[in-house]
Each structure stands twice: as structure tokens, then as C-alpha cells.
Image: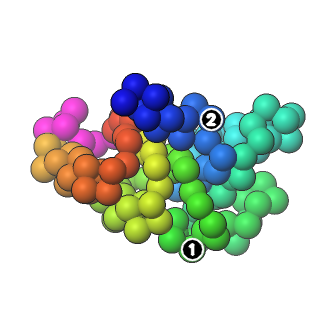
Amino acid sequence: MLEASVKQLDAFFNPRSVAVVGATKKINKAGHVIFKNFVENKRRGVFRGDIYPVNPHEDYILGFQCYPKLTKIPGELELAVIVVPAEIVPEIMEDAAAKRVKAVVIISSGFGEIGNHELERRVVGIAKRAGIRVLGPNCL
């Protein structure tokens, strides 16, 4: 059982594929900084997995094809990093469930920490139903 739990954590610490939902060309936004860090680590050989920016308003970000939503990314996706407004997170989590994403990091704030417990319960419910491991929300 411990071995299975450790293997599930690989999606956080050694993912073969990562999507940054909320990646953007706007350099002052967290979505840009996070995606740029993955790109730089990939170019240096530190990160060897596939990286995908997700933003319905962009075609390319830092030379990488942008996807409008998680379900449009080809192949398997192990980790999604979510950097969008809190009210959109449940929709992104439903996409993650449909895509069978193994783990999600929710950078977004605006959940239980400000009294929005129902929104947080919705996200937790989707994650439990789909078997998605979650780090967050509000974890930057």
C-alpha cells in the first residue's frame, strides 16, 4: 500500500507531462512565471517531461502550442497546475477528471480561506470522485 501511495506522488514530484492552466504571455502574472519556469527547466534538461500551456485566448506561449482546455491536449497528462480565478476551478477540475489527470496543484486563492467553503467542497468532491490527488488551493 505504501508503494502505491508513493507512486501516486510521482505525479507531483516527477511528472512525465504537465499542463499549466492559466499560462499567459503577460509577464506580471503567476501563470506566466510558472509556465516560464517549466520551459527554462526543460531547456536546461532539468525537467524532461512534456509541457503544455492551457489558455483559450492564446495560440502559442514561449514557443509552445497553447490548448484551449485540458481535454484538448493529446495523450496522457499526469499533472495540471491551475492558476485561474477560483470560480473557474471547478470547471477545470471537471476537465481534469475527464482527462484522467493524476494530480493537480491549485495555485488559485479564494476558497475556504475567505469563507468560500462551498466552492472548496465542490473542488474536493470532483477530486475524490475522479481519484485526483490535490495540492492546494492557495498554495504559492
Q: Position of residue 17 (x, y in %)?
A: 64, 50
Q: Main secondary structure of the magenta part?
A: loop
Q: Amino acid at mark 2?
A: Asn
Residue 36 picture location, percent across and down: 71, 43
Vertical relation: 16 (above or below) 9: below
Which range of residues does the magenta coloring cover? Answer: 108-115
SS at circle 2: loop
Which residue is pictured at 70% across the width and 71% down the height? Answer: 59
| 81 displayed left or right of 133 | right
Q: Quadrant of residue 27?
A: top right
The residue singled out by tag 1 in the image is 72
Residue appearing at x 52%, y 65% in the figure: 70
Whether residue 23 appears in this view of the structure is: no
Lateral position of residue 1 relative to residue 22, left or right: left
- The answer to whether 22 is drawn above or below residue 68 in the figure is above
Which three-letter amino acid code belongs to the residue tagged 1?
A: Lys
- In this view, 44 is above or below 108: above
Number of residues whose C-alpha sits closer than 10 Å to that of mark 1, classed few (under 14), some (14–19) or many (20 or more): few
